[in-house]
Amino acid sequence: MLIIFGVVALSLFLQQEFSIKQATLFLIGIGLGITLLHAAFGFTGSWRAFLRKRRSEGIRAQLLLLGVTSILFFPVLGKIFPELHVNAALAPVGLSVLVGAFLFGLGMQFGGGCGSGTLFTVGGGHVRMLIVLAFFIVGATIGSVHLPAWAALPNVGKISLIQELGWLPALLLQLVVFGVLFYLVRNFEQRRHGDIHKLGHASGNKSFIDQLIFGPWPLWWAIASLAALNYLTLLIAGHAWTITFAFGLWGTKIWAAMGGDISTWTYWQGAYASKALNNSVLADTTTLMDFGIIIGAMLAAALAGKFAPDSKIDRTGLFTAIAGGLMLGYGARLAFGCNIGGLLAGISTGSVHGWLWLVSGFIGNMAGVWLRVLLKIDKPLEA
């Protein structure tokens, strides 16, 4: 009840002091947090399960999410409704994304979470993930300082499939690629195990309402909920769901408050970044949604009886949390976003850099899985 009261109070405050738009985006963040925790919808564990055991249900769910989100986004971005002013998550296709996504993928396996995964596990009470988040912020802040130099490295500029092909041909092309990838990962699982895990959790004897409130959710529910909430974000905020811009913003504000000199940090002199830096963090859309995800996951964990902080962290866990957090933050800034702002938002709005992010980030995860075995964090890979 205390969490619900806090959500209502903060929503009313945001509406009064800022706008109904800010309050609504905060509530969308709450919905995202509830969805992510109840469905345990993450990228890191799913990619590790596929790389180690060839179990593909998590990746198949992600491909379906990308497909549904693209179907929702492409017509709007293709201006079939001219009165709607929305922006694609376009970024240059080049070395910055290639290196950044690889580092982020490596950090996923060291830190034990991605952008969305870190937030909802923090909300779920995982103390180690607080350390990951703290160094995620440090890495993103350092990355924002270095980004102008990385962005100056060779690249082919921003490429939009929607602008190059038209929204319908571009959408059909993406859906074909999603279908091929879906078939491939499913076939890998079938060949390894002789069966296919379904996209859902057994609900036992729970009623629909009980399962909706207390969880766990089938992955189908998560796909529908995440796509719908992301679509609302696009329509209300004017851009797709993002996460990690806020981390660099928080770190830069903290450094400035401690007396640090940020006058030479070129990234924060841009129009959008400078405005965010000079305003309250509650005026920043990404910050509000990130706060919402953490609180929503906290609420879901409390309802499910899963909120149980564990403060036991060994030396290896501390090292991987710090290293993972730094790689996640730095990589996300170089790659113009994490698995949400770079991969999901990029691909679902037609940006080619999102596809480069997917390939390089997956290779980074492969390296991370191998290093976890080398450092004896995990058992050797199955034959």
Image (cartoon, rainbow, N blue to C red):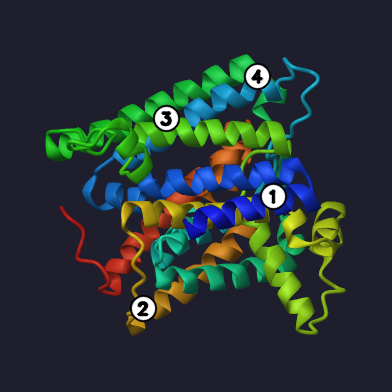
User: In 3D space, how far apart are the residues under numbered discs 1 and 2 (Cα atoms)?
Assistant: 34 Å
Depth check: 319 or 203 in front?
Answer: 203
Residue drawn at x 31%, y 35% is 185
Tell me the kind of residue under disc 1: Leu
Q: Nearer the viewer, mark 4 or mark 1?
A: 1
Look at the picture and state if 251 lies above or below 48: below
Q: Sequence order check: which comes first, mark 4 or mark 1?
A: 1
Determine the residue located farthest toward the left in the rendered image.
Answer: 194
C-alpha gap between disc 3 and disc 2: 36 Å
Is residue 177 visible in this depiction of the protein? yes
Percent of width and height locating residue 55: 24, 43
- Residue at the spot of label 2: 311
Q: Read off the residue under disc 1.
A: 12
Asked if marks 4 and 1 touch (Cβ < 8 Å), the reply is no
Badge 3 vs badge 1, beta-carbon distance below 8 Å: no
**Mark 4 is on which residue type?**
Pro
What amino acid type is highlighted by mark number 3?
A: Leu
Residue 353 percent coordinates (x, y): 62, 41
Upstream in sequence: badge 2 or badge 4: 4
Which element carries disc 1, helix, strand or loop?
helix
- Residue 153 higher or lower than 250, as above or below: above
